[in-house]
Image (spheres, rainbow, N blue to C red):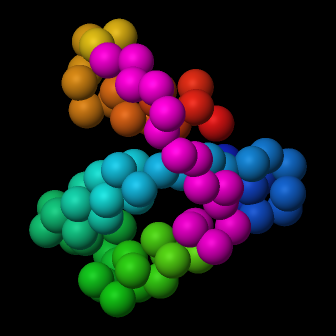
Amino acid sequence: MALLNEALSGGIEILISTALVLEYEAVLTRAEHLRASELTLGEVEKLLDAICRMASEVIIHWQWRPQLLDPDDEMVLETAING
C-alpha cells in the first residue's frame, strides 16, 4: 500500500505493460484474493482502471527471458527494463 500511496502522490512512477495488467487482473480476481482483500470484482476493476490511468505504458521491445527463478515474474522484469 505504501508504494501505491507514493505513486498517487507523484513520488514514484508506475510502469505497466499489457501483459502485466492482464496478470494483475487474473491474480486479483481469484476467489481467495477477493476474500482476503474484501473487494468485489467491480472494485478490483476500478482499482486496475485507476492504476492504468496513472501509470506509464511500456511497450515491450526486447524480451529478457529466462532471467528469474519464478517465470511468472519475468513480465515484471521485462516491463521495468523496457521502461
Q: In this view of the protein, which residue sits in the foreground, 27 or 15?
A: 15
Q: At x 33% / y 75%, what residue is drawn?
A: 38
Residue 33, horizontal then vertical, whole percent: 24, 61
In the picture, the quarter occupied by the N terminus is bottom right
Magenta-drawn stretch contains 59: yes
Quarter of the picture holding the C terminus? top right
Name the image quarter holding residue 71. top left
Q: Give the residue displayed 47% in from the left and 71% down from the top.
A: 48
Seen at 57% across and 47% down, the residue is: 58
Q: Residue furthest front?
A: 61
Q: Is residue 66 visible?
A: yes
- Whether 26 is drawn above or below 13: the answer is below
Q: Position of residue 27 (x, y in %)?
A: 25, 56
- 64 left or right, relative to 50: left
Please report the residue visible at 56 percent of the width from the left and 68 percent of the height from the top. Answer: 52
Q: Position of residue 45 (x, y in %)?
A: 39, 80
Left or right of residue 8: residue 32: left
Which image quadrant for residue 44? bottom left
For this orientation, the residue located farthest to the left is: 31
Can see residue 1? no
Vertically, is 32 above or below 38?
above
**Where is residue 46 shown, x and y percent of the image?**
47, 83
The span shown in magenta is 51-65
**Magenta span includes 52:** yes
Relative to 19, 1 lies left or right: right
**Extreme residue in the bottom direction:** 42
Task: Give above or below for 11 relative to 80.
Answer: below
